Image (cartoon, grey):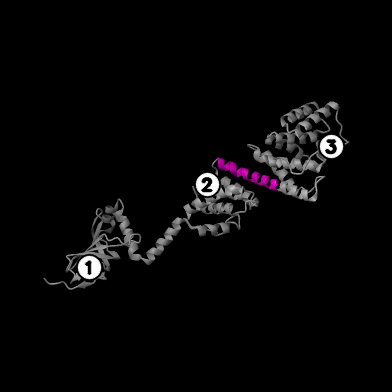
Amino acid sequence: MFRIITLVVCLAAALAAQQAKQYKNPAEYQVYKAATSALAANDFAKALVSLDTWSQNYPDSDFKDDRQFLYVLAYAGAKQSAKAIDAAAILLAKPNLEAALPDAADQLRLLYTAAAAIPDARVPTAEELATAADAAHRLLAFDKKPQGLTDDAWAQARGQVQTAARRTLLFVALVPGSRAMEKGDCAPAEAAFTKALQENPDSVQASWNFGSAELCLYKTQPAKAIPAIYAFARAAALDPVKGMADPKWQQTTVEPFLEKVFQQYHGADSKALDELKRQAAQSPFPPRGFTIQSAADIAREKQAEFEKSNPQLALWMKIKAALSDAAGENYFAAELKGVAVPQLRGVLLDAKPSCRPIELRVAVPLPDSPQSQDAEIVLKLDAPLTGKPDLHADIQWEGVPSAFTQTPFLLTMDAERSKIEGLKTTPCTRK
């Protein structure tokens, strides 16, 4: 994990070349040789034993900076990431790293190891996070080509270490928000992830985490649903390479989750979702005034348009819904009985008697069941009609409710013959 392609560190040659430094005695050289040989063989446990022996027997060695660098490599190889970062911190704290590690390849290896180790540190301390961030910033600015590398090889290696540096800085930026989310502290998580997204606007993970914090706040602040969905849309829309994300995770986790929350909030609408992703890809945060219509908003708009276009039917649907409720009979007695109802519209199904009737039975077909022909309203007229009414005709009337039964559903209204429109009658046949 911590190796840099094409960078080879010849530790023995590097130490031997530093003429100003001297081993205290042959025994120090032998313990140094044991440590480097173990490192070369990837026997990191043995390397650490040799390094500890070297430190205990020769604490003031001329090569203590080089030994510290070997500790960094050995801890990293042994998967003791926190200790690798702690060991690197000692070198990074020196006012002149070049004096401690003159070789550019060693400097680069140190910075890379310290930066790349942080995600594997189980619970990194604030100091370890700061060390990794420091190493990452130095990596981004590192421009000294190690000896032995061609320009092309150096360009490739530099690109790799800079990508690693950006990943480290993103990880460090996300830690405060992630820890807040683990505790259920939604507001601090939002603040931390906002800062992380500002610093890493093209990051898929930063957008995803910011959306998660907004969704956390949505439980008590419904308005947070919109920035949450926007953030998930951006996480789904960003290029995974530029956004430093696993494309499989983006496709199997981010995309389905976005579709789920968008449908729950807005309703199934693939065109609207595609447009949202297009917009979200342009900016890390929603522009001023940005909104997403909720399913409730859409339903209210449709209802308002329906009531505007079909006022009579809309009025009846409200009345029927109230009467059909468990408390429908109470509603009738308290609010409807004896109160004049504005004009309604329906279909005449029956008349009693069939000639010169004083009672009309009416159905009101609804949009979802236009063929329904069950009589729901009885009109009791103040005077008989003059003939036989044509059945199945559309009529309009005004009336005053006077009786109601819920089972079977039937509303009785007193109506003046003069206030009924659309009636067509034929003369009654004499017997």
According to the picture, the residue beneath numbered tag 1 turns out to be 416
Element type where label 3 sits in the image:
helix
Q: Check if residue 164 falls in the magenta segment.
A: yes
Residue 13 — which label?
Answer: 3
Type of residue at label 2? Answer: Cys
| Residue 378 locus on image (x, y percent) | 23, 61
The earlier-in-sequence mark between 2 and 1 is 2
Q: The magenta stretch spans which residues? A: 163-182
Residue 216 — which label?
Answer: 2
The label nearer to you, 3 versus 1, is 3
92 or 122: which is nearer to us? 122
The earlier-in-sequence mark between 3 and 1 is 3
Q: Label 1 crowding class (10 Å Cα cut-off): few <14, some 14-19, many 20+?
A: some
Q: Label 2 crowding class (10 Å Cα cut-off): few <14, some 14-19, many 20+?
A: many
Type of residue at label 1? Answer: Glu
Does 399 sit above or below residue 230? below
Q: Residue furthest right?
A: 19
| Residue 150 locus on image (x, y percent) | 80, 48
Does 54 sit above or below residue 331? above
